[in-house]
Image (cartoon, helix red, strand yellow):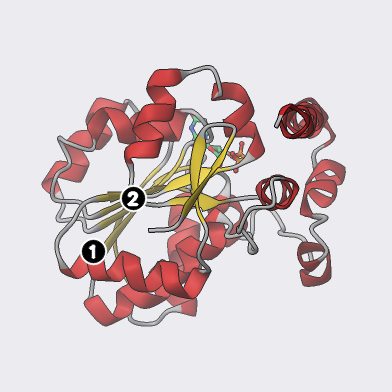
């Protein structure tokens, strides 16, 4: 399997179509997958965190979730050509899940958001089976109990980073019957139409970060990190 390292974090180099085929091959073989999103923020917040890096690198799929990762790969003369965002992959998995009648659970977001996202997904994918939702502010032990009492094949976790990654790492063995566990950040806010995603031409031109910044100016503090990430990549390149 083709992978590339971005400041020590493994990232897959193939495209969405290949990735989806691989994911569902594993699904048919009953393998449990924790699908990891690698974006500049995660890299920057954790590039000295060896333990986390090791856990994330051990997983089978780490998606290039953000144009910063594609840019870094280009600077390293790497092979990551296409950004695969968490929300796009989530929607593709939802679409494909209809062929398998998979049981899906949506966990995270403010009260009511996951329920609204469920309704929107059911409109978009008539055969989808969403068997439960839970907001992201309940006691996690209670949520675990609910998940164990419900037959779930695919779990999307929208608690923001690093909470969602930590949740999956902590409980994935306990939730051994769930085949796909995936952190999806603010995706339920977008799917439920609570927050707007950027128009297509902005996404295509890799300017989604700017659109989100204008919608939520306090994101500037997070985005300053992006500049630091760029420096690290450029400095590393000079060292080689
Ligand atoms: N959230 C949650 N529980 C928490 C903290 C956050 O459910 O304890 C949700 C929050 O409501 C939002 C999402 O996590 O829907 C995080 O969104 P953000 O835009 O920060 O995610 P990003 O995709 O930027 O990581």
Residue 221: mark in rendering: none
Residue 214 is left or right of residue 221, and the answer is: right
Q: Position of residue 114 (x, y in %)?
A: 45, 52
For residue 85, above or below residue 40:
below
Residue 26: mark in rendering: 1
| Residue drawn at point x = 81 percent, y = 28 percent | 224
| Residue drawn at point x = 79 percent, y = 58 percent | 206
| Residue drawn at point x = 43 percent, y = 55 percent | 115
**If the image is split into quadrants, where does the C terminus sit?**
top right
- Ligand 1, by image quadrant, is top right
**If the image is split into quadrants, where does the N terminus sit?**
bottom left
Q: Position of residue 31 (x, y in %)?
A: 18, 56
Residue 60: mark in rendering: 2
Distance between mark 2 and mark 1 Cα atoms: 10 Å
Front one among 14 and 131: 14
Label 1 sits on a secondary structure element that is helix
Residue 141 is left or right of residue 60, and the answer is: left
CB of mark 2 within 8 Å of CB of mark 1? yes
Q: Position of residue 196 (x, y in %)?
A: 72, 58
């Amino acid at each position: 399997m083709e992978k590339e390292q971005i400041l020590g974090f493994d990232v897959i180099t193939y495209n969405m179509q290949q990735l989806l085929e691989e994911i569902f091959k594993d699904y048919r073989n009953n393998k449990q997958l924790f699908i990891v999103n690698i974006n500049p923020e995660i890299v920057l917040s954790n590039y000295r965190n060896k333990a986390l890096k090791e856990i994330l690198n051990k997983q089978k799929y780490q998606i290039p979730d953000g144009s910063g990762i594609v840019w870094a790969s280009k600077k390293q003369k790497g092979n990551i050509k296409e950004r695969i965002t968490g929300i796009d992959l989530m929607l593709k998995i939802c679409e494909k899940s209809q062929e398998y009648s998979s049981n899906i659970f949506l966990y995270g977001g403010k009260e009511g958001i996951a329920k609204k996202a469920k309704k929107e997904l059911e409109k978009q994918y008539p055969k989808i089976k969403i068997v439960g939702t839970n907001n992201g502010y309940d006691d996690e032990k209670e949520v675990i109990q609910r998940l164990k009492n419900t037959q779930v094949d695919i779990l999307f976790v929208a608690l923001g980073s690093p909470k969602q990654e930590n949740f999956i790492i902590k409980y994935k063995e306990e939730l051994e019957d769930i085949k796909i566990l995936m952190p999806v950040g603010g995706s339920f806010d977008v799917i439920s139409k609570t927050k707007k995603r950027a128009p297509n031409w902005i996404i295509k031109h890799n300017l989604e970060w700017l659109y989100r910044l204008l919608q939520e100016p306090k994101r500037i503090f997070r985005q300053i990190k992006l500049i630091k990430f760029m420096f690290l990549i450029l400095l590393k390149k000079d060292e080689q």
